[in-house]
Amino acid sequence: MENGMATVPLVGPGTSDRIAEAVRRSGPLLRPIASSRGVLMERKSRPSPQTAYLERIYQPRSSDVVLRRYKVRQKVGYGSFGTVVQAEDGITGTIVAIKLLHKMQGLHNDIRQEERVFEILAGGCSPRISLFAQVLQSGTFKGFHCTVFDFCDATLYDLIESGEGMMPLPPFHIREIALQIIQGIEYLHSLGLVHTDIKPDNIALRRADTVTVQQLDRGTFRKKRLLVSTAICIIDLGGAMTFGQASAMQRPVCPRMYRAPEVILGMPWSSPVDAFAVGCVIAELCLVKNLFHPETESNGEHLAMIERIVGRFPRDFAKLAESKRPGTFHLGATVAVLFPPHGIPSAGEQFADSMRRLLDARPLSSAIYDVQLVDLLKKLMMPDPAQRSLLGDAARHVYFDHTVTWTGAQY
Ligand SMILES: Nc1ncnc2c1ncn2[C@@H]1O[C@H](COP(=O)(O)OP(=O)(O)OP(=O)(O)O)[C@@H](O)[C@H]1O
């Protein structure tokens, strides 16, 4: 093993130690054969619109120098609110990410929202600030409001979609990433803020350096790529709101696949929506696919899917939901989501696809084999928000015993 390590080429200051550590913790049956640096995965951001709005959306050009300092290199991401580019700082030479907000009326109530939320986080004076992308500067370029952030090599979405040879991640990497997400979002909650947009696209890996190892698997060595560091960075604070704003919010929040039952049912919601979404993201990282089928067509199907995968809704919660949305639950000897809706045969043509998806969905405990992880996920995704685990408690779950996390200083 020691000799094997000596053949690994260095990929940056201090990196060899981290490679050695990553390999050592992955088990005794490994030998490193190569290492690579930086963005090793194709960036998989959602597609840009091909519409008439193009002039209101920043189109990156390699000759652009944003805020007279940052030389644009390439587009790395695109979201509902902005285009994100990679740029080089002309003064320090460091690589940054710049988000240039779309110029669309009504899209931004407050164009400085992300910066303000980051200021609140920074004001909390906690080392957990390193779990978020730092805002370095902001201003206007070609009429676009732009915010400059730390650059992250890849998101969990990139990793899941195109982390070839890396997925599934070793269990200890999943644990380290999960703990950081929980601790970061718990920090937001401790400052009275709800993120509202937790999804794999919004959790980034600061560095995507990998080491390729040969892993002994049933008598033969197979190639496997390991992350050198699991340091994460939570991005996109643009949807974050205070508990007070959350309680007054009418429109649904959270992307559908990560949306908690109380939001689906139009009931009051608050910070537990983040816990539910965190559970979905951790499960997705283990399964290397969405926990809830991405083509789920209706709220009814989604609730039935939650019931099948996570567990039954408690009677009190179902009763409350029934009083607001009659026809959602069957309140008999057992409480059950009424899907397909009352009076429509489940064998009918109309719901055939939905019924097929529901039948294919596997309960958490039969899809994930780590019993402690399943217990944690069930607590994070309790259908009733009043029973859902607080993130502080989740961070102390036995699943995380002996988990080492990388701090900001180490990535
Ligand atoms: N600091 C960063 N480093 C590297 N890539 C980033 C960074 N911030 C954002 N990105 C990339 O840009 C994408 C869009 O960013 P972001 O989610 O902040 O934009 P948005 O317009 O608010 O999107 P959404 O539709 O999710 O609300 C991300 O999914 C990611 O791929």
Image (tube, rainbow, N blue to C red):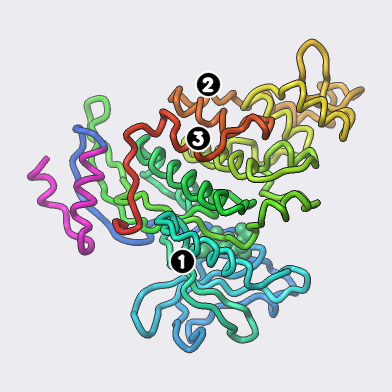
- How would you classify the magenta stretch by its main secondary structure? helix
Assign the N terminus to one quadrant of the image.
top left
Is 9 within the magenta?
Answer: yes
Is 375 within the magenta?
Answer: no
Q: Is residue 142 left or right of residue 14?
A: right
The residue that label 2 is drawn on is 366
Q: Quadrant of ligand 1?
A: bottom right
Task: Check disc 2: other Cα within 10 Å, few if <14, some if 14-19, many if 20+.
Answer: few
Assign the C terminus to one quadrant of the image.
bottom left
Q: Earlier in the sequence, mark 2 or mark 3?
A: 2
Q: Earlier in the sequence, mark 1 or mark 3?
A: 1
Task: Check disc 3: other Cα within 10 Å, few if <14, some if 14-19, many if 20+.
Answer: few
The residue that label 1 is drawn on is 134
Q: Is residue 29 left or right of residue 326?
A: left
The residue that label 3 is drawn on is 393
> Where in the figure is residue 351, as x and y percent of width and height?
81, 30
> Where in the figure is residue 267, as x and y percent of width and height?
79, 40
Secondary structure at badge 3 equals: helix
- Residue 131 falls in image quadrant: bottom left
Task: Check disc 1: other Cα within 10 Å, few if <14, some if 14-19, many if 20+.
Answer: many
Q: Which residues are magenta?
A: 1-25
> Where in the figure is residue 343, as x and y percent of width and height?
92, 22
Position of 114 relative to 300 (above/below)? below
Q: Ligand 1 near label 2 (Cβ, under 8 Å)?
A: no
